[in-house]
Amino acid sequence: MKRLESIDLLRGGVMVVMALDHVRDFFGTAGNPTDPATTTAALFFTRWVTHICAPTFFLLMGAGAFLAGRTKPSGELSRYLLLRGVWLIALEIVVVRCLGLQFNVDYRTTMVNVLWALGWSMIALAGLVHLPAVAVGIIGVVTIVGHNLFDGVRASTFGMFAPLWTALHGQGVIVSSPRFLVFAAYPLIPWVGVAAAGYALAGVFSWPAPRRVAALWRIGLGCAAAFVVLRALNVYGDPVPWAGQLSATRTALSFLNTTKYPPSLLFLLMTLGPALCVLAALDGRTPAALRPLLTFGRVPLFYYLGHLTVIHLLAVVVCYLHYGDAHWMFESPRLDQFPFTRPPGWGFSLPTVYLIWAGVVAAMYPLCARVARQPAPHQPQRVSEFTAASRSAGLPPPLAPG
């Protein structure tokens, strides 16, 4: 369906932006880029603009589940989501951790990130799809709005089940032993809520274009306005209130510095509002200058795995040329130096980071274009229709034919 080009465009755009954050991780200087007291405006917004990526991924994944499900009974859709959720979790632990981020298999330090949370969100949706879409949407919105009520609950409250609470609504170590450490970076509860909200939202894509566009604008602008009002009140929606700083610019940075881990209500309003406005603005039109984004948006998983590997390989080369050695790039990092142990004096200027980012995106384009042109494997007609719908909606490919 042509109108789904807006989804591919948005997804492709945020994936390009996502690469900027990962290049900064590997090539930028150490330090907290969003601390309003110490950062620069340029570094802050380099990190801040990438905040739109994860919420958009989860929202569009939920929408994709709904759109793909229109060609399949709920039971088959549930199985589809369950299998793909398990597959994404396995990819996170094996492929992303070993090949994308650390280039080793010692598993001394393992951080589970976005694919982990996307996988569990798919598994949760596998159960939720048996409910009416309106009910799924209510669950999603209530989760997003209400989860900050539990910000004061500490994992230690749950005793031996503390790691479970950390995985659900905290951020921290969930497995610790003398040999292995697993750190959950993406707490699951808020992200499942975003996916559920996206599942319900996807119903608007069956509406006539004028009504659909108007709805997307209303919801997007409403989210943005709610962010401004709630953040100004400073009473609920984020565990870290904003505060006056030494200058107006730094105060503005504090206002925008919402919590991503776990994503607060204000973080999600701040990011999903603009994402929905972009969907509305691009509905039914694809500017020629943005058409390359369609290629990235149609092969999201390949791009994600590929760009991490390209960035890390480039870091290995640069490290070897600079130091005559690159052993740091193959070591499991400390948690305060993720995703790799930095060599002494490692880190490049922000313009250099942007230049490397542009090179990585340019390098990924022909690879993604080739993958996007690959025909789907032969499958029975009913299955191939579902696969086509799921591909257009951005869901991962099947585990196996049939």
Image (spheres, grey):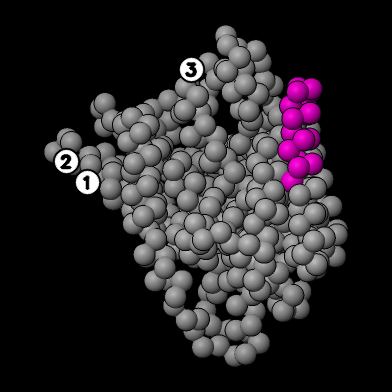
- Badge 3, how many Cα within 10 Å: few under 14, some, many 20+? few
Q: CA distance from mark 1 to mark 3?
A: 31 Å
Q: Amino acid at mark 2?
A: Leu
Total marks in image: 3
Q: Are marks 2 and 3 in contact (CB under 8 Å)?
A: no
Q: CA distance from mark 1 to mark 2?
A: 6 Å
For residue 321, the mark is 2
Please state the extent of the stretch shown in magenta in the rendering. 220-236
Q: Earlier in the sequence, mark 1 or mark 3?
A: 3
Q: CA distance from mark 2 to mark 3?
A: 31 Å
- Measured as percent of width and height from the top left, residue 342 is found at 31, 33
Compared with residue 18, is residue 155 higher up or lower down, i.e. above or below? above
Q: Is residue 347 left or right of residue 387?
A: left
Is residue 278 among what the camera can see?
A: yes
Residue corresponding to mark 3: 38
Main structural element of the magenta stretch: helix, strand or loop? helix
